[in-house]
Image: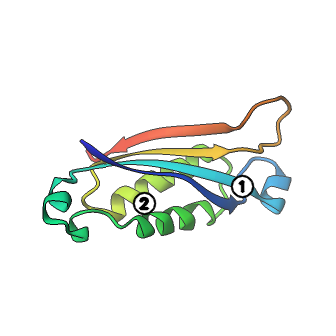
């Protein structure tokens, strides 16, 4: 299957278990891998046969900057549901939500959740 990748989208959200995360917020990064048949778009040079990257960004922004969730797992799930529900040409998606600055002790680059969802 063909894929569109949209990576390192940066947003500011209020997701987390700790009260300070819900009050102060923090950065989140999102990587998407979207599966669909791109041959019609490429053969016909027609954007209507693909998915608009700007619309992908806006859907992602609405979820990540929207209602606070306790878990990034929930953010990823909501995003996958919304992408599959919004873009009919999409057959599956891989969603990675990255939390670079979680309030947990230790040395690491980030924590992340990655899910894969497809149409049933």
Colour convention: rainbow
Q: Callout 2: few (<14), some (14-19), or many (20+) C-alpha neighbours within 10 Å?
A: some
Left/right of residue 83 with respect to residue 106 in the rendered view: left
**Residue tagged 2:** 82
Where the N terminus falls, by quadrant? top left
Q: Nearer the viewer, residue 79 or 107?
A: 107
Q: Residue at x 41, y 64 (%)?
A: 53
Q: Which mark is residue 77?
A: none
Q: Secondary structure at mark 2?
A: helix
Alpha carbons under labels 2 and 1: distance apart: 21 Å
Left or right: residue 19 compared with residue 38: right
Residue 120: name its quadrant: top left
Residue occupying image coordinates x 72% and y 59%: 14
Q: State left or right for residue 89 relative to residue 109.
A: left
Indicate the position of residue 68 as horizontal and vertical percent values: 67, 60
Label 1 neighbourhood size at 10 Å, few (<14), some (14-19), many (20+)? Answer: some
Q: Position of residue 116 (x, y in %)?
A: 41, 39
Left or right relative to 83: residue 7: right
Q: How far from the left and from the top, in percent, is residue 5?
A: 41, 49
Q: Circle 1 sits on which residue?
A: 27
Vertical relation: 26 (above or below) 98:
below
The tag earlier along the polypeptide, 2 or 1, is 1
Residue 107 image-quadrant placement? top right
Under circle 1, the secondary element is strand
In front of the other: label 2 or label 1? 1
Q: Position of residue 78 (x, y in %)?
A: 50, 54
């Amino acid at each position: 299957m063909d894929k569109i990748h949209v990576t390192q989208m940066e947003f500011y959200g209020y997701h987390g278990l700790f009260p300070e995360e819900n009050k102060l917020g923090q950065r989140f990064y999102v990587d998407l891998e979207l599966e669909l048949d791109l041959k019609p778009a490429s053969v016909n040079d027609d954007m209507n046969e693909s998915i608009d990257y700007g619309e992908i960004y806006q859907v992602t922004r609405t979820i990540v900057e929207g209602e606070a969730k306790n878990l990034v797992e929930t953010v990823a799930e909501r995003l996958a549901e919304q992408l599959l529900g919004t873009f009919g040409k999409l057959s599956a998606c891989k969603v990675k939500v990255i939390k670079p600055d979680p309030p947990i002790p230790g040395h690491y680059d980030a924590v992340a959740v990655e899910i894969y969802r497809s149409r049933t």
